[in-house]
Image: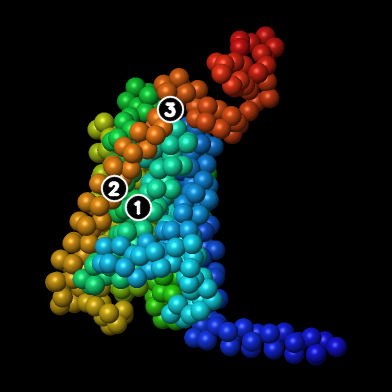
Amino acid sequence: MRKKTLQGIAALGLSGLALAEGVDGAATAWILVSTALVFLMTPALAFFYGGLVRAKNVLNTMMMSFAALGFVGVGWALLGYSLAFAEGSPWLGGLGHALLKGVGLEAKGEIPHLLFMAFQGTFAILTAALLTGALVERMRFPALLLFLTLWGLLVYAPIAHWVWGGGFLGALGALDFAGGTVVHINAGVAALVGALVLGTRKDYGRQAILPHNVPFTLLGAALLWFGWFGFNGGSALASGEGAALAFANTLLAPMATVVAWAVLDLLRTGKVTAVGLATAIIVGLVAITPAAGFVSPLSSLVLGAVAAFPSYFFLLYRPRTRLDDSLDVFGGHGLAGITGALLTGVFAEKAWNGVADGLLFGNPTQLWVQAVAVLAAILYSALGTFLLLRLVALLTPLRASPKEEGLGLDVTQHGEEAYTSGEGAILVLSGSPSVPALKPKGGEA
């Protein structure tokens, strides 16, 4: 009986292979795992960001990432994927895959087309979630939902098309293995614009705004590094040598960034902070992302170490300004993405990637091409983000009121708190001012 059952399962498997001619089982298995790993990165980001804000805003901050899973994800499936990857112009994809038309189990490279769409969708979701780190503790949640949905369609999708979907940057020869330009420069610049449009938080520059739970941030950094193996390794879209190279470089580059960052901290203050080390991990991961499948392992160590310097010193400088990029998205993602994209044009080695050499290996033109791609992403992301924020502001207020900021966005935007002490929890009544739910015995309301 068991033998017949096994034969039946084998027959079904062979039938499936026949229906999906051209699909490679090993490649499909790896991209299935990679898609799950990249999906995990958005909840991981919620912990990373959530630990860095004040206790009264932690739920709102984490909800920004979790909401992106739904709103950006649905937009991607219905329209965004088509705008990024359907046949179109050098500037934008067409509507050939709108509503997932023509996206089935047929081969897309060596994997099912549907899986390719899902894998790319996790990138779109994460990119939108990344930029929210500059908007925390002051943006109204309804406005955020509308903005993220539109941004995924009108800013992320076009840049993805330019680089990966047959657009002009890919045709120019720009190298972006897993999203230095498409994801990190894009998100970092959008965050910078968002911070400028929203303005500073109510208490910025008047009191210390300290992380409420650094272990959350360390947990988020660890899970992000774990997910990043799928982010970079999966971008090979196969399970062969390219995936192995990207996987190893994703391990090595952040290690070097951590060492360089720690040494800078020790030289400057004699101490290595936990938030600094978590930030270093992210900076190294961001910097290696565009180069992961194009540079040698030794070059990845050098790239990771070099990337620490611009981000480290920018993060020291930024608090002295009126730029309230609350969680340093531009310094950690935008600037590190720019550094990584340009250094890809320096360290790319055809002996390892089979595609192109960089400056150090006799091809200085590649650095110029990388610079053009970086500039194009910066300009479009900045302009598109600014216009979308202005559009959303015409439809609904962007910012919470000073009173709402004072109470915290957890209560005013979601009607709940991350931490309560039982008595004294805040109760919000519709149309009424916030009042204490219970008065602690012998205490004040």
Q: Residue at x 26, y 31 (%)?
A: 322
Q: Secondary structure at mark 1?
A: helix
Whether residue 109 is visible? yes
- First in residue order: circle 1 vs circle 2: 1
Q: 199 or 121, which is in the foreground? A: 121
- First in residue order: circle 1 vs circle 3: 1
Q: Which residue is mark 2?
A: 384
Q: Secondary structure at mark 3?
A: loop
Quadrant in which residue 320 is drawn: top left
Please indicate whether residue 152 sits to the left or right of residue 107 in the image: left
Q: Which residue is mark 1?
A: 154
What type is the residue that disc 2 sits on?
A: Gly
Q: Residue at x 25, y 56 (%)?
A: 377
What type is the residue that disc 1 sits on?
A: Leu
Q: 298 or 32, which is in the foreground? A: 32
Disc 3 residue crowd, few under 14, some 14–19, many 20+, Cα 10 Å: many
Q: Are marks 1 and 2 in contact (CB under 8 Å)?
A: yes
